[in-house]
């Protein structure tokens, strides 16, 4: 069975909610919709306090090439276009809407029937995807229409669909692949059409045999689409790891991108969002979010309107367990711990993981024993123990020479350390500084016009 | 809110192994050899091992408490591992006070001087053993006991010009003269399997040492003009005799004194195998494992500097400049 070539770890998968069908969370009374839900420039608000909006209506417009449109997720009245505190406790521009009923903007097809036929030209497809504000839903939130705009010097040969979901606990992509299989496959063919490629590979780890079987059966009807079971290993859902697992090609170190090896990668849930955008004219205003954790009464997969406070999901799962805990936006390997449970669900939020008891706390670290587990675990072939040490000593040149810019921050190093050293904390710090130096150098070397 | 929210950067997962659990596994893996040794040499093996462990733990505790003035580190069990390994490298007839001297050199000189666990460049137990070998050569090489009289198989080999066909089954189960922990090849291999199963070490270093030693011995036998059974018995003899098993499985794999990459580990292990055989065949000592490991320990920083893991997305070494 295929997998990626270097490193990786096997955290216990804890997919508590894998058997729970997607259910719709009751609509919230108030939604807070941040203007920065994607990589790139925050969108520009197009509504003002007091405006009436419909669900699916454009409320903020992409500001520049690398940006994405944002739509109202509920119908109601705009109560604020102001700063709101996000999950990390930082103030961030957002539009707040008080919900009134559930009315949708005109032209959006809300029926369940699957529309398979698509005869649009590639640029029309990309325009619809852009207009729907679709971004990568696996967490990176890269605007999809930008990804589809392949530079003329490059040629896309294959679409890779990421159905790996290698993060422990999370099951939202799994449920989407199972319950919205047809839509996903139509979305995949639309993306293939937009890119002008004949082949698409859907990579799924073999801890989801039901999704593999169902998609493989249905994919037989779609030309050029294959479903590839993958050996379970974290971080297989990392873009570069997945490409290597499926095609054997390794994306060179930064600034190279997947397109440099002829591949465009798209998350499984994103493919469904693309389907809805193109075939149903439905913008990205809701998504499936896993709410999970060992201490929760009912781990679930919920269909949630964007902007819903995370606390509403926690309530729906039976509330926070007793004692101190950690609310993680995402899975336990790469998710971000939240200090504010009232922060909203955004486009890139695939799950909320509640860690309680000993799982929530970091254990005391001790001496590095040079066991080399971090080196063996690093999927990028780096030496985390050395990078971490050099970052502490502020050895920026040594960090650059050690290829710190290649670090994908997957966390395999920290998670495999028997001395519990916070390796990635230091590496992240070093990487930020080195990237700043690299950018400054590039700027200095660019001839002024 | 009743309960506090904890925040920290990702990842929010930590290893199921800890330094302490790893050291505990190493101690467990040494138990079969301890049992066989006790059976072969008698109860004094247990007493000397306990004494060695007690001295190592005590010295580390005292140094950490009164000189370093840092947190107590003996709980990570690494001093206990050093204690057992040191005892395993000594003959059973050793006077108790020499054990204490060895423990002091191992812990105080070879380990704590450099900053403790993970920072020592040389294997502490081996430094202790080699110090004793140089300081007390008579006591360190008298292997005569109630059970055995005379020389170890390696010494017998060293000073006889012919390969007399040593008793390989006896070497395998440990029914020979030698240091306390080195005699039982079978028990040490059992420990090796346990360490592999518990994912404490990988197979590379021990196996490459064995292969390197066996190849070296094979060609040495060819060079001596031997034929027939001697061509495989001679390499096998060298793997089973002396400290080869103990050194390859438990000493050469010491984390802080072995390279950080698999490829580096292979170079290091091949060097240990070759050096061991050189010393055994042509050196002044009958046994060369400890020296070979210590010499290659010295090469580890160099190996780490030049043998890097292959970076993802880079197929060959980038051109310089």
Image (tube, helix red, strand yellow):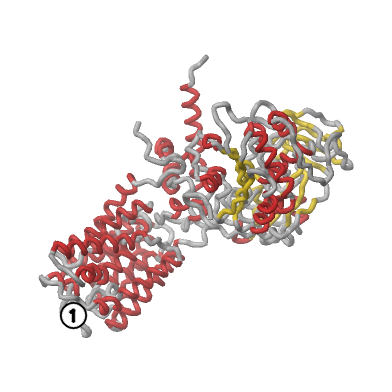
Query: Would residue A42 be seen by someone viewing this image from the given angle?
Result: no
Q: Residue furthest right?
A: A101
Residue A414 lies, in percent from the top left, at: 50, 52
Decide which of B223, B270 is in the foreground and name it.
B223
Image quarter (top left, top right, bottom left or bottom right) of the C terminus of chain B = top left
Left or right? Give the position of A382 relative to A157. left
Query: Would residue B176 be seen by someone viewing this image from the given angle?
Result: yes
Tag 1 subunit: B
Residue B76 lies, in percent from the top left, at: 43, 64
- Which residue is painted at 70% across and 45% down in the image? A185
Residue B84 lies, in percent from the top left, at: 33, 71
Quadrant of the image occupied by residue B233? bottom left
- Give the residue number, with chain letter if any, for mark 1: B144
Residue A65, relative to residue A254: is it above or below? above
Q: Residue furthest bottom?
A: B146
Residue A355, relative to residue A98: is it above or below? below
Decide which of B41, A144 is in the foreground and name it.
A144
Residue A100 lies, in percent from the top left, at: 88, 41
Left or right? Give the position of A24 relative to A448. right
Residue A141, relative to residue B235: is it above or below? above
- Mark 1 surroundings: few (<14), some (14-19) or many (≥20) residues within 10 A: some
Numbered circles on residues, count: 1
- Which residue is painted at 26% across and 71% down in the image? B240
- Which residue is painted at 51% across and 51% down in the image? A412
Quadrant of the image occupied by residue A257? top right
Element marked by disc 1: loop
Left or right? Give the position of B226 relative to A298. left
Left or right? Give the position of A278 relative to A106. left
- Which residue is painted at 46% across and 22% down in the image? A445
């Amino acid at each position: 069975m295929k997998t990626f070539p270097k490193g990786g770890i096997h955290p216990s998968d804890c997919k508590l909610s894998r058997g729970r069908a997607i259910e719709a969370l009751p609509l919230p009374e108030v939604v807070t919709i941040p203007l920065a839900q994607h990589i790139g420039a925050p969108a520009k608000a197009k509504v003002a306090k007091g405006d009436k909006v419909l669900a699916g209506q454009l409320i903020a417009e992409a500001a520049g090439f690398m940006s994405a449109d944002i739509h109202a997720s509920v119908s109601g009245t705009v109560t604020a276009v102001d700063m709101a505190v996000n999950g990390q406790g930082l103030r961030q521009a957002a539009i707040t809407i008080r919900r009134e009923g559930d009315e949708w903007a005109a032209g959006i097809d809300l029926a369940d029937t699957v529309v398979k036929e698509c005869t649009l030209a590639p640029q029309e497809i990309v325009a619809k995807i852009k207009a729907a504000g679709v971004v990568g839903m696996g967490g990176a939130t890269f605007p999809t229409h930008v990804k589809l705009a392949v530079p003329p010097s490059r040629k896309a040969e294959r679409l890779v669909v990421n159905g790996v979901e290698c993060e422990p606990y999370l099951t939202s992509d799994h449920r989407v692949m199972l319950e919205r299989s047809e839509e996903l496959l139509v979305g995949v063919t639309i993306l293939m059409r937009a890119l002008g490629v004949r082949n698409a590979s859907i990579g799924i780890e073999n801890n989801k045999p039901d999704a593999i079987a169902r998609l493989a059966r249905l994919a037989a009807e779609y030309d050029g689409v294959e479903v590839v079971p993958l050996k379970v290993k974290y971080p297989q859902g990392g873009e570069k790891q997945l490409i290597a697992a499926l095609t054997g090609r390794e994306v060179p170190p930064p600034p190279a991108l997947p397109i440099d090896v002829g591949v465009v990668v798209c998350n499984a849930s994103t493919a469904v969002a693309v389907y809805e955008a193109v075939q149903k004219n439905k913008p990205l205003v809701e998504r499936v979010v896993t709410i999970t954790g060992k201490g929760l009464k009912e781990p679930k997969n919920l269909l949630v309107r964007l902007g819903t406070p995370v606390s509403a999901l926690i309530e729906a799962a039976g509330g926070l367990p007793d004692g101190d805990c950690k609310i993680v936006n995402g899975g336990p390997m790469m998710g971000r711990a939240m200090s504010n449970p009232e922060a909203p669900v955004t486009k890139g939020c695939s799950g909320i993981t509640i860690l309680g008891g000993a799982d929530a706390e970091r254990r005391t670290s001790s001496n590095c024993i040079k066991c080399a587990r971090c080196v063996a675990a690093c999927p990028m072939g780096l030496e985390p123990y050395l990078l971490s040490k050099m970052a502490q000593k502020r050895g920026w040149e040594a960090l650059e020479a050690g290829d710190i810019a290649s670090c994908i921050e997957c966390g395999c190093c920290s998670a495999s350390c028997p001395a519990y050293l916070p390796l990635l904390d230091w590496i992240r710090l070093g990487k930020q500084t080195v990237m700043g130096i690299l950018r400054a150098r590039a700027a200095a070397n660019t001839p002024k016009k | 809110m009743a309960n506090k929210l904890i925040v920290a950067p990702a990842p929010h997962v930590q290893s199921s192994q800890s330094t302490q659990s790893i050291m505990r596994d190493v101690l467990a893996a040494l138990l079969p050899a301890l049992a066989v040794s006790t059976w072969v040499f008698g109860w004094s093996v247990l007493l000397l091992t306990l004494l060695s462990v007690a001295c190592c733990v005590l010295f580390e505790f005292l140094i950490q408490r009164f000189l370093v003035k840092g947190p107590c580190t003996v709980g990570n069990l690494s001093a206990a591992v050093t204690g057992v390994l040191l005892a395993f490298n000594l003959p059973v007839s050793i006077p108790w006070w020499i054990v204490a001297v060895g423990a002091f050199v191992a812990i105080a000189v070879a380990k704590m001087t450099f900053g403790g666990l993970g920072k020592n460049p040389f294997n502490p137990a081996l430094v202790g053993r080699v110090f004793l070998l140089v300081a007390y050569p008579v006591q360190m090489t008298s292997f005569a006991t109630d059970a055995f009289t005379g020389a170890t198989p390696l010494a017998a080999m060293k000073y006889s010009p012919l390969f007399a066909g040593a008793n390989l089954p006896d070497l395998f189960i440990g029914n020979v003269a030698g240091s306390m922990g080195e005699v039982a090849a079978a028990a040490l291999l059992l420990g090796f399997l346990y360490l592999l199963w518990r994912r404490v070490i990988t197979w590379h270093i021990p196996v490459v040492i064995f292969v390197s030693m066996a190849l070296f011995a094979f060609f040495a036998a060819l060079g001596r003009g031997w034929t027939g059974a001697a061509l495989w018995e001679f390499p096998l003899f060298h793997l089973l005799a002396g400290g080869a098993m103990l050194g390859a499985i438990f000493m050469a794999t010491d984390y802080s004194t072995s390279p950080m990459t698999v490829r580096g580990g292979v170079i290091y292990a091949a060097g240990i195998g070759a050096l061991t055989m050189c010393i055994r065949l042509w050196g002044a000592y009958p046994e060369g494992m400890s020296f070979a490991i210590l010499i290659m320990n010295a090469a580890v920083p160099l190996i780490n500097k030049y043998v890097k893991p292959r970076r993802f997305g880079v197929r060959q070494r980038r051109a310089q400049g």
